Amino acid sequence: MIQTRIKTKVIAGVVLLALVAVAGFAQKGPKDKIAFGPLNPIKIPKVETATLSNGLRLFLVEDPEYPTIDVWAWVRAGSVFEPADKAGLAGITGQVLRTGGTAAKTGDEIDKELETLAARVETYIGQTNGALSVSCLKEDIDKSLAILADILMNPAFRQDKIDLAKLQARTGIVRRNDDIGQITNREFRKLIYGKHGVYARHTEYATIDAIGRDDIVAFYKTYFHPNNAWMAVWGDFKAKDMIAKIKAALGKWPKGQASTAPWPTVPYQDKFTVNFIDKPDVNQSNVMLGHIGGYMNNPDYPALSIMNFILSFERMFKKLRTDEGLAYSVWGSYGAGYINPGVFSCGIQTKSQSTVYAIDLMLKELKRITEQEVTDEELAKAKDGYLNGYVFEFDSRSQIVNRMMMYAYFGYPLDFSAKIKMGVEKVSKADVLRVAKKYLRPDKVQILVVGKKEDFDKPLSTLGEVNVIDIDIPPAKK
């Protein structure tokens, strides 16, 4: 989902670029300097905005060179609003909204019609938003919009497709402990957001079994209204003509009660914990340690981005992988959310015999960045890496218009990206040290280890009292 498919933007979004950058640095001698040329100016296309009489908000970008017309809509909904005893309701509603067809056509009939048009219409609901998308050739936009409108206004939620969606959800539950990385990420989020917190909650057989068609219809009726939605459109069209087409297709979508439910809060408490999940069938450990993160609109977010870049790639990556040779992978992110606090975490995948030693090194690096100012070289590399990666957020008009709609959805200014860029350019060494001291808490991190304890170099208890986490899946009712 978008587990929020967007959910929150985290600094880990630059991980791939950072790794490429680090690899490039590693090929140079320690005295070699890498010269970065000035960034090309970022050209922001003109975005037309409009609001239909039923409250549907539009963002439109004309692009005559784009081969198709694409539509992307967000609805203020999400799994954070579903009942805890029916976890999975939002996702199933989003899936069957499309597959269940309409009063006039089954989902399979809609599939065939879209195939003849070489078009696509999709729907889903993630953690903090519902989404709909359309992609079609210019000449088929009227037909494609008509299909979208029919799905939005006249969903049938046929029982056979509900049963299929629930079966697929159960299959996901069966397999959720197959991958050690998936286990680590899932259970670490529970440590941060709470075992039953809405930002870490997941489905169980019982919650899926509790979902009925009436629940799905009620969830749809609660959130799917035009005055509870935002829509972005880009492609080969004239904005005035496109507004008229959308009005013809969706202008009769009746207004409803726009969702005003507040986004759930996170009652996090600082504490130091050591947690363990036994996986005797592996020969390496997955380790994550950290605490609650922050928000994107924090004025210190640009400095935190650079601090994280230095900590994760200039410090931990070099120390644990390059210098010590302990890691298959090392990563870190100071997560920041739009409407919920992100997660600050550092992680490593290492052989079982170096588990505790690696944790000790990670804690030392975490403490060091809160005590010592970074070097000029570290600051320059981090800012260059971040800013050179930043331009890829503007390499297509679709990214630009979608981001603007996302900012509007979460109540951020439409020029938020530009403000972040300007903030990063101004970050100093003093800023990095200041935010590290203010936001990082090396003595109150939560540590999670997934691995085979018999092979560890030291008992985890040398770090502190160990809490053993049970990941057994509650069995389904017969």
Image (cartoon, helix red, strand yellow):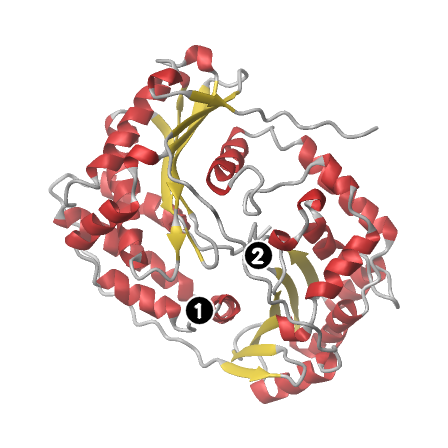
Residue shown at the point (52%, 56%) measured from the top left: 6
Asked if residue 317 shows in the view, the reply is no
> In terms of depth relative to the viewer, which is nearer, 295 or 422?
295
Cα separation between marks 2 and 1? 15 Å
Q: Residue at x 65, y 64 (%)?
A: 132
Q: Quadrant of residue 232?
A: bottom right
What x and y, as percent, mark residue 244? 66, 87
- Callout 2 crowding tier (Cα within 10 Å): few <14, some 14–19, many ≥20: many
Q: Closest to the observer: 231 or 36?
A: 231
Q: Is residue 253 above or below residue 170?
A: below
Instruction: Quadrant for the C terminus, please.
Output: top right
The residue at the point 53 percent across, 68 percent down is 409
| Mark 1 crowdedness (10 Å alpha carbons): few <14, some 14-19, many ≥20 | some
The residue indicated by pointer 2 is 128
Residue 374, position in %: x, y?
Answer: 16, 45
Quadrant location of residue 167?
top right
Q: Quadrant of residue 416?
A: bottom left
Vertical relation: 156 (above or below) 342: below
Q: Which mark is residue 190?
A: none
- Does residue 123 appear to the left or right of 278 in the view shown? right
Q: Secondary structure at mark 2?
A: loop
Please state if 309 lies on the left or on the right of 188 as rendered.
left
Could you say where residue 313 lies in the image, as x and y percent from the top left? Answer: 29, 41
The residue pinned by badge 1 equals 412
Task: Indicate the secondary structure of the residue bearing disc 1.
Answer: loop
Left or right: residue 217 compared with residue 325: right
- Indicate the amino acid at tag 1: Tyr
- Asked if one can make out residue 399 in the rendered structure from this viewpoint, the answer is yes
Of mark 2 and mark 1, the one earlier in the sequence is 2
